[in-house]
Amino acid sequence: MRRPKGIFQKIDWWLIILFLLLVLIGWLNIYAAVYDEEHTSILDIQQRYGKQLIFILAAMLIALATLSIDQKFFNSVSYIIYGTTILILVVVIFIGKEVSGSKSWIQIGGFGFQPAEFAKTATALVLARFLSSLEVDFRKPKYLIISFLLFLIPCLLVLMQHDTGSALVFFAFILVLYRAGLTGFVLLAFVIIPVLGVLALLVPKLILAGVILLICIVLFLRTRRRIRNLLLTFLLFLASTGFVFSVDYVFNRVLQPHQQQRIKVLLGMETDVKGAGYNVNQSLIAIGSGRLTGKGYLQGTQTKYNFVPEQSTDFIFCTIGEEWGFIGSFIIILLFTALFVRIILIAERQRAKFSRYFGYGLASVLFFHFAINIGMSIGLLPVIGIPLPFISYGGSSLWAFTLMLFIFIRQDSKRYELV
């Protein structure tokens, strides 16, 4: 541990300013989302905005503590942190408290926290440690398998807690593998898979299989016609058609009924504005009613009369859209964009591979949350229930994101001492 007087030396103040702006904006919008005329004080700890202030103060302590820790500590204990986190995720499956259909919370007295949020930080640490400690060559299957297992294990454990949204976030770490040398073909495959899954729900399976066969034939004809390429093309056809015919099973047996309904509504397979599509429909009304400049702070009618469920957590963006309008929403998107760009630029200037890969892990997780949360708020993506970083109500997500960000800031402050 270093003395506190030196913790602010050489830290990136732009990242901290962006962090503080987003946290402040989040707090003000939580106040607007659950505003109660009988409890007008923003410091009232009996209300969500008062509790969020406590979460923010605790986050500031986490930030200061993280900056005080030796920069090499997180690298050296990453495997221990990861292993401990995996054990906690297993325990949650058996003793976790169920909230909104997800058994992903640990309750200690009147305090509850969600280990899945901190598992993202642990996974980013261990993945950065693994990728930086060896001469990883993804042409060798063992490195690819180990890298995938490092984020698939917590992903599956979180999925067993019926928290599909948080489980999907772990796939963001594929971008870290891509930065570490993973071929673009694998990255492209993870883009094609969800597209193929959607088509499997909308298009008859036999027709889709026929199209896949034609594509595989064209691919083979455009390559050297060797036995090896023929076998690879045949395996690609088997894998693709096997996936297509398994989509129905996964959709009906793995996803929860409410998740199935939300996907059907999103894809236009059903219309249910009073049921599964209610949240998104009300969110769109709220955002659209804000127009260019918004209705004004605390003047949102959709927000004030609670038409949008979870408007201080998963649907906080609709509060911003209604009261701040297009201009306010665009400013929020610009702030997040600046945050992502800054993290990537800082990651690229790192001398130590660990710091660089951890930075990419941070950027990937934050971007996934940002894109999915806003996408589901405006009806472009299914509602899977993940918070908007630093803005949505909640202690676990705020603390986990703060810890992850300030570990990176601490690593960057000592980049000339790390190799």
Image (spheres, grey):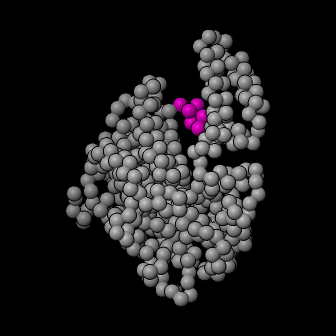
How many marks the image carries: the answer is 0
Q: Is residue 339 visible?
A: no
Q: Main secondary structure of the magenta part?
A: helix
Q: Residue at x 49, y 62 (%)?
A: 99
Rendering coords of residue 331 (x, y %): 60, 66
Q: Residue at x 56, y 58 (%)?
A: 385
- Magenta stretch contains residue 186: yes
In front: 103, or 124?
103
Q: Residue at x 36, y 51 (%)?
A: 91
Left or right? Give the position of 394 relative to 125: right
Q: Residue at x 50, y 37 (%)?
A: 178
Left or right? Give the position of 62 relative to 32: left
Rendering coords of residue 286 (x, y %): 69, 71
On screen, residue 337 above or below 138: below
Magenta residue span: 183-191
Which quadrant is the C terminus positioned in?
Answer: top left
Which quadrant is the N terminus positioned in?
Answer: bottom left
In front: 15, or 63?
63
Q: Is residue 221 visible?
A: yes
- Magenta stretch contains residue 355: no
Rendering coords of residue 311 (x, y %): 59, 69
Rendering coords of residue 118 (x, y %): 40, 54
